[in-house]
Amino acid sequence: MTVLIDQPMWPAHDTIWAHLVSDASLDELHAFAAANGIPRRGFDRDHYDVPLERHEALVAAGAVFVSNRELVTRLRASGLRVTARERRGL
């Protein structure tokens, strides 16, 4: 089981955001986020949005830095990915 983090590149709310995911378990993801002070409100169905200023600390805490493409590939392979269609409720 691994918690992954991608390159911050999503602008919003005066910062740049990265995604934090687990390649095995949402329980693992929630536990890692809680242990590192990431609020539950940052969770969006299959990932946490994390601001640029937290990126380095999350990597130091054990999140594995991967490319944006690898993060999505591993999230899909885990079966935890929520598709755009599912997000729309179709």
Image: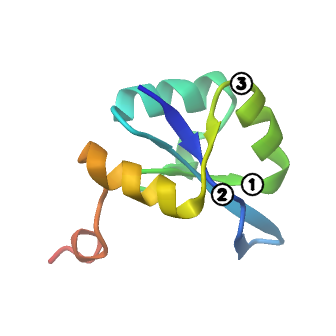
Tag 1 residue? 51
Does any portion of residue 45 appear in the rendered image?
A: no
Badge 3 marks a residue whose secondary structure is: loop
Per the rendering, the mark at residue 65 is none
Q: Where does the image place residue 67, in percent across and percent down from the top left?
A: 60, 57
Between label 2 and label 1, give the one nearer the viewer. Answer: 2
Q: Judge by depth and name the residue closer to the eye, 22 or 77.
A: 77
Q: Is residue 36 visible?
A: yes
Q: CA distance from mark 3 to mark 1?
A: 15 Å
What label does residue 18 carry, if any?
A: 2
Identify the residue shown where x is 76% and y is 45%.
55
| Above-or-below relation of 35 to 68 | above
Q: Earlier in the sequence, mark 2 or mark 3?
A: 2
Dot 2 falls on a residue whose secondary structure is strand
Q: What's the mark number on residue 61?
A: 3
Residue drawn at the location 66% of the way across and 57% of the way down: 18
Q: Which numbered disc flags the more N-terminal residue, 3 or 1? A: 1
Contact? badges 2 and 1 (CB < 8 Å): yes
Chosen colour scheme: rainbow
Q: Amino acid at mark 3?
A: Ala
Residue 34 image offset from top left, x and y in percent: 58, 27
Viewer-proximal residue among 66 and 88 = 66
Q: Quick one: label 3, few (<14), some, or many (20+) residues within 10 Å?
A: few
Q: Earlier in the sequence, mark 2 or mark 1?
A: 2
How crowded pointer 1 is (Cα within 10 Å; few <14, some 14-19, many 20+) is rated as many
Counting from the top left corner in percent of width and height, residue 23 is at 39, 38
